[in-house]
Image (cartoon, rainbow, N blue to C red):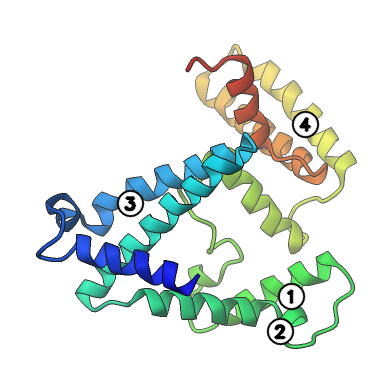
Amino acid sequence: MENSFKRMVDMVAKLRSDEGCLWDKEQTPASAAPYLIEEAYEVIETIAENDQDNLKEELGDLLLQVIFQAQIAAESGAFTIKEVLDQACEKLIRRHPHVFAGLKVKDVNEILANWERIKQSEKKDKSASEQSPLSGIPKHLPSLLLTRRVQDKLGRFDSISNDPEDAVRQVDNNWSKFKENAGEEKDGAEKELGNLLFHLVNLARMRGLDAETILRNKVRSDYWIP
């Protein structure tokens, strides 16, 4: 496995070298970023389709993009792929004391609580905005996924309801308000629709469902035109 990883790292370095590919040499972190996003979505698609053969290929394509970004960084002296891996390993160790440090935990909820506590301690020297429980969530996630991630975080700190019955009441209430505003001014309808979608995602979360995946699968299965 180590030889295979080094082989890809060396190949990417050659592609970026003076003897390499003109197109690859011209790329910047920004110009290559769309390919990273595209490959990530292709991985998600093969997982959704339970397509193991293509998943193997797409994971390779995604790994290639990660190594490519690290190679560009190495050329500028910012960091190397080894530093990326070392930092990731240290983070795994630090955030899994129940696995690597013998910490006793009762259940998954305690594991998640410890995870958030450790993350916050890592940010103690950062600005107030970076210390927010939500600061680690990527801002450009698809809207339903972004909503789910925010709710996951808030739910761990009891900053949002974790009661399914309360979520149902919220959905019913917002649906009524949306119907009342649907024929009125656009701003009012948008606000109420936003509230309704937020609480629908929260209800799905508490029932162990992922609204992003469910809606994507619905569109793909019932309306998708290849």
Left or right of 42 on screen, residue 155: right
Kindly identify which numbered label has been placed on residue 171. 4
Q: With respect to residue 112, does 180 lie above or below?
A: above
Q: Give the crowd class for mark 4: few <14, some 14-19, many >=20 residues within 10 Å.
A: many
Place of residue 210 in the rendered image (x, y in percent of width and height, measured from the top left): 70, 40
Place of residue 161 in the rendered image (x, y in percent of width and height, measured from the top left): 80, 50
Place of residue 85 in the rendered image (x, y in percent of width and height, measured from the top left): 47, 75
For marks 1 and 4, the one nearer the N-term is 1
Residue that carries the numbered disc 3 in the rendered image: 33
Kindly identify which numbered label has been placed on residue 100. 2
For marks 3 and 4, the one nearer the N-term is 3
For marks 1 and 3, the one nearer the N-term is 3
Which label sits in the foreground, 3 or 4?
3
The reply to whether residue 123 is visible in this rendering is: no
Q: Give the crowd class for mark 1: few <14, some 14-19, many >=20 residues within 10 Å.
A: some
Left or right of 49 on screen, residue 25: left
Q: Amino acid at mark 4?
A: Val
Q: In the image shown, does 93 or 170 lie closer to the viewer?
A: 93
